[in-house]
Amino acid sequence: MCSFPADRLKCKVLAEGANGPTTAAADQILHEKGIFVIPDILANAGGVTVSYFEWVQDRMGYFWREDVVNERLQDKMVASFNDLCRYADAHSVDTRTAAYMLAIDRVAYDTRMRGIYA
């Protein structure tokens, strides 16, 4: 495991790797330094999103060209990033907290709309 003290970072934006790479203490330092963090659950969402696209195509029995997949992926990722930024601003929280809040809100909304077993 690689360890790098957050207080030594000089970047303006940090895109995290997968699976919770930043400690709570480092998160606080990043926030205090004004470093914009793209949380791991967003930064690594592209692969999962394309897996979902593959599932949709299999279910439909109709397959998209690579450029169509890439365009749809870009649309989803840009929209997700914009949603995250708006949510963080609206609730005055950091991007990681906003990502978790937004995810929980979406699951709760879908559960209310579809029911728990849909």
Image: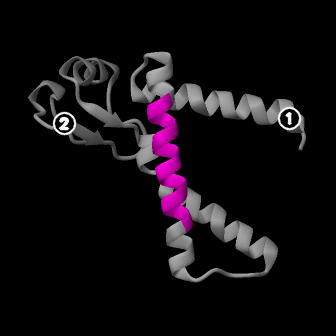
What residue does disc 2 label?
A: 12
Are the residues flagged by discs 2 and 1 in contact, CB closer than 8 Å? no
What residue does disc 1 label?
A: 113
**Residue 54 placement: quadrant:** bottom right
Residue 105 visible in the displayed image: yes
Amino acid residing under circle 2:
Lys
Secondary structure that dominates the magenta span: helix
Q: CA distance from mark 2 to mark 1?
A: 39 Å
Amino acid residing under circle 1:
Met
Q: x and y percent of residue 93 in the render?
A: 43, 18
In the image shown, does 63 or 47 lie closer to the viewer? 63
| Magenta extent | 72-86
Query: At numbered mark 1, what does the secondary structure look like: helix, strand or loop?
Result: helix
Q: Residues within 10 Å of mark 1 (few under 14, many from 20)?
A: few
Q: Residues within 10 Å of mark 2 (few under 14, many from 20)?
A: few
Residue 45 visible in the displayed image: no
Q: x and y percent of residue 40 in the render?
A: 41, 41
Query: At numbered mark 2, what does the secondary structure look like: helix, strand or loop?
Result: loop
Q: Earlier in the sequence, mark 2 or mark 1?
A: 2
